[in-house]
Image: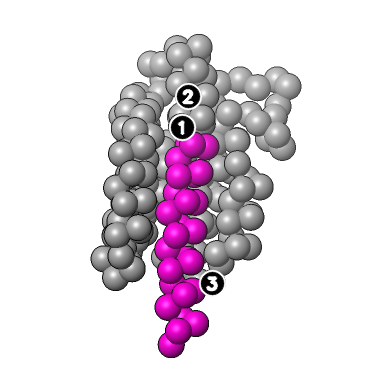
Amino acid sequence: MYRRVQAAQQKWGGALTAIDHWLEERQQLIISYCKLAGLPPFDDKQRSKPSQEAVQEFCQILMDYLSAGHFEVYEQIVSECAVNGTDSRQLANRLYPKIATSTDLALDFNDKYAEHFSTRQSGAFDLELSDLGQALEERFELEDELINTLHDKHSDQASMA
């Protein structure tokens, strides 16, 4: 996941401020996820349950990332689609429902663990965190497809000007 965000930053960095900010938030989200899940380079052989503060921090970053996507980047993509024609609009219409699935999973995770972490069972938490990680990975692929379309259309318009 982390390598993918670095590649995305190299490919699309500097094209649009909203995308730059969003990719930075994605990077923070991935780092926080890896820490919470105990993944390399944050794997600890004596890993105990993450603290409530760590879970809350992760959930806050997760909610910030989802919000930035829905209220900044996706809106820009939709407006670009209106300018750039039906191909972009069709892509957005095809991908948004798939992205919404991961949004629902992330919101459920947040509702369940952000404030009530102490009541969770370790096995359920670990399983749901793993499921969320997989959903985020899929989401990032879909978002990258949208960003690529927006970037390509933005670059085409800039070269015509």
**Residue 72 in view, yes or no:** no
Tell me whether the residue at label 1 lies in contact with that at label 2, contact meaning CB atoms closer than 8 angstroms. yes
* Residue annotated with mark 2: 131
Boundaries of the magenta span: 136-161
User: What residue is rendered at 45% in x and 40% in y?
Assistant: 139
Q: Amino acid at mark 1?
A: Ala
Viewer-side residue, 84 vs 35: 84
User: What residue is rendered at 58% in x and 56% in y?
Assistant: 8
Q: Amino acid at mark 3?
A: Gly
Where residue 59 sits: x, y (%)?
41, 38
* Residue annotated with mark 3: 14
Q: Amino acid at mark 2?
A: Asp
How many C-alpha atoms fall within 10 Å of the one at disc 1: few (<14), some, or many (≥20)?
Answer: some
Tell me whether the residue at label 2 lies in contact with that at label 3, contact meaning CB atoms closer than 8 angstroms. no
How many C-alpha atoms fall within 10 Å of the one at disc 2: few (<14), some, or many (≥20)?
Answer: some
Where residue 45 sits: x, y (%)?
73, 22
Q: Secondary structure at mark 3?
A: loop
Q: Secondary structure at mark 1?
A: helix
User: What residue is rendered at 43% in x and 54% in y?
Assistant: 146
* Residue annotated with mark 1: 135
